[in-house]
Amino acid sequence: MPERVTKREVVNRLLAGRPQTPGNRANAFAPANIALGKYWGKRDAELNLPLSSSLSVSLGRLGTQTEITPLNGHDEVFLNGEPVPADDTFARRSSEFLDLFRPPGTGFRVRTQNSLPTAAGLASSASGFAALALALDELFGWGLTPRELSILARLGSGSACRSVCEGFVLWHAGERKDGLDSFAEALPERWPELRLGLLEINAAAKPLDSRTAMARTVATSALYEAWPVQAQRDLAALRRAIAAKDFEQLGQAAENNALAMHGAMLGARPPILYWQPATVEAIHQVWQLRAEGQKVYLTIDAGPNLVLLFLEGDAEILSRSFPQLEVVTPFFAGSA
Ligand code: PMV
């Protein structure tokens, strides 16, 4: 096998012998996901292959709905009903992904409806690329397995491989150079009482995208050397907590994992800090509530916003402490 495998080679391998002509229209939904054990650092930037495994929970009905229609000529990308200029990052990344599958001369109209703020660190690129992969599978009639769909979504954005599943999702880092063993799968456990609270500090696009921040952390932060051990330990704790429905163990592992990731970023040169004053204020508020006996924990992705973790019975009291809290039920009746 050659030293480096390209996206196109992976796609050729996955789609060998599958239909190459798109149908008329397809539609798919993928939930957003929030990592409890984070993915931070790549072993291969082209294929979005991670250095360590990660574990997320999907955001139930919050995510991305994508409709795709083939066109003659150029792509047309719409985000929440508005046309997106072709040179915008969102349109460019969508078109680059579509390049992997497009028959010569074919464009696509992609209508994306996000129920989360795009690029605010709440994983909308994850649900975006997952929904696009699912919609393409339907449009072309490939009939890919969940594992293959996860691999395809990962080529768009790493964390997207976890958004093809619902509930608790484990992304196996894998070891192969072509990444065919780096995919996400749903864990069997459900936790209907678990709640997530989205605390939006700032919905504006983040100043530094996660791929740049990740690469800089890996390349320059001495604190990143501790990350593989941290990631492995937290993943084991999270899995034990999920199996035993031990909420405090889950919350502690998730919060510590997120803070360690941000710590590693602070150690980068130049340093990376996504937090804003209001982020820090909210962190202290969560810790104060916990000191008062409230069972609430937090996690933060590559952005200023918080996601709170708590149980159903505490939703009301936390909504009083954080009036802007959007409470999400990851496991609802009818979800997988
Ligand atoms: O998939 P990306 O490149 O958007 O990276 C996601 C990184 C984090 O959201 C911070 C962590 C994670 O595991 O989702």
Image: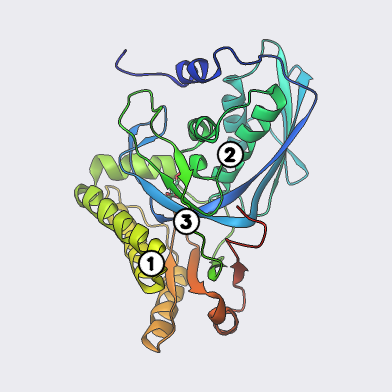
Mark 3 / mark 2, whichever is N-terminal: 2
Disc 1 crowd rating (10 Å Cα; few below 14, some 14-19, many 20+) is few
The reply, left or right, for residue 50 in relation to residue 87 is left
Numbered label attached to residue 303 = 3
Q: Give the CA separation, mark 3 to mark 1.
A: 31 Å
Numbered label attached to residue 103 = none
- Which residue lies at the image location 38% right of the left edge and 71% below the top edge? 246
Amino acid type assigned to the residue bearing label 1 in the image: Ala
Image spot of residue 18 (x, y percent): 61, 16
Name the residue tied to disc 1.
244
Image spot of residue 265 (x, y percent): 31, 52
Q: Say which quarter of the image contains residue 89.
A: top right
Amino acid type assigned to the residue bearing label 2 in the image: Ala
- Which residue lies at the image location 51% right of the left edge and 60% below the top edge? 190
Disc 2 crowd rating (10 Å Cα; few below 14, some 14-19, many 20+) is many
Mark 3 / mark 1, whichever is N-terminal: 1
Name the residue tied to disc 2.
130
Q: Give the CA separation, mark 2 to mark 1.
A: 30 Å
Q: Secondary structure at mark 3?
A: loop
Q: Nearer the viewer, residue 276 or 129?
A: 129
Q: Secondary structure at mark 2?
A: helix
Q: Nearer the viewer, residue 277 or 64?
A: 64
Image spot of residue 20 (x, y percent): 66, 14
Q: Secondary structure at mark 1?
A: helix
Residue 121 visible in the current orientation: no
In front of the other: label 3 or label 1? 1
Considering every residue shown, the one lying at the far bottom of the view is 292
